[in-house]
Amino acid sequence: MITGIGPEAGQALLDHPKISKLAFTGSTGIGYNVAKAASEKLIPATLELGGKSANIVFADANWDKTLEGGALSILLNQGQVCESGARLFVQQEIFDQFVSELKTKFEGVNVGDPMDPNTQMGSQISEAQMTRILGYIDIAKEEGATILTGGKRMLKAGQENGFFIEPTIITHADNAMKVAQEEIFGPVVVVIPFSTEEEVIAMANQSDYGLAGGVWTQDINRALRVAQAVETGRMWVNTYHELPAHAPFGGYKKSGIGRETHKSMIDAYTQKKNILISLNEKPLGLF
């Protein structure tokens, strides 16, 4: 166990000649540095990196469970979860009602001291991260999107010295906007309408990332079609953020290389050796 900040302790690990395997969980930007260090030393690396996961809601979904899932997918741990459902795609025929009720749910979240058992969402990890998130909210406005609710730092009594941000919903956004494509890593969800299954699969796959995602529907055939078609390492069906230890976790594209939390990860930390023994005591007779 080595403690320290990345530029010092982390870099020392990357440079150490006796390190024979690198594994990194964090941003895609730093993931490039880890991959480069591994390639220069010709050692394996597994990378669990960023995401901009698509959370897809069809009109036939279980309403109450899906509404909770829309909030849970982005507000858990203040949105500081790599697989957060940061892009919420809602089918057109239920879009207005769903977003209206999601807004009410967001505005009812109890934000405060994480040591208080009644708190549902705490503060961001640092002032720098809070500033970064607020910067993306400003970008959303500049891009022409609408801040339906939230979007500001919280400064009421008990919060003025912390880095609290209101749970935020962004609407009237295009899937190509920065706020829909770049990882914000905060309690900010971009909600986008869709009409057909084919359309939402295409939008979900319009991303540099492919870490996770969700699909909400009571049609099992549709659920499996969408789950298989979205280019991502995990798709939840009618749930989100469940992380069982036996299930492989990892991403496609810029979300990483390799899988964790599954027996297959043993391959990343071991070498396969073949020992071949001849039981024939006679010479081959070739020479």
Image (cartoon, rainbow, N blue to C red):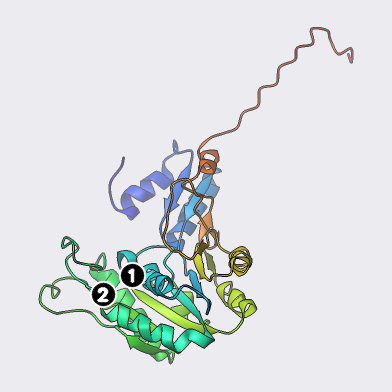
Residue 87 visible in the displayed image: yes
Residue 223 picture quarter: bottom right
Q: Could you classify mark 2 by the number of other residues whose Cα lies within 10 Å: few (under 14), some (14-19), or many (20 or more)?
A: some
Residues under numbered marks 2 and 1 in contact, where contact means CB atoms less than 8 Å apart: yes
Q: Amino acid at mark 1?
A: Leu
* Residue furthest to the left: 157
Query: Which residue is at a point 86% across and 13% down the rendered structure image?
Result: 284
Nearest to N terminus: mark 2 or mark 1: 1
Q: Residue 10: x, y in percent?
A: 36, 49
Give the secondary structure at mark 1.
Answer: helix
- Residue beneath label 2, please? 109
| Element type where label 2 sits in the image | loop
Q: Is residue 186 left or right of residue 57?
A: left
- Mark 2–mark 1 Cα distance, whole angstroms, equals 9 Å
When the figure is inspected, residue 110 is found, relative to residue 138, above or below; the finding is above
Between 36 and 271, the one lying in front of the other is: 271
Position of residue 214 measured from the top left corner of the image (x, y, whole percent): 50, 67
Q: Which mark is residue 12?
A: none
For residue 102, side relative to residue 159 (left or right): right
Task: Please give the name of the residue rendered at 41% of the width and 41% of the height, measured from the top-left corner.
Answer: 16
Figure quadrant of residue 27: bottom left
Viewer-closest of 61 and 153: 61
132 or 199: nearer the eye?
A: 199
Residue extending furthest toward the top: 281
The answer, for residue 134, to whether it is visible in the render is no
Residue 221 spot, x, y in % from top left:
63, 66
Residue at 51% in and 53% down:
35
Name the residue carrying label 1. Answer: 75
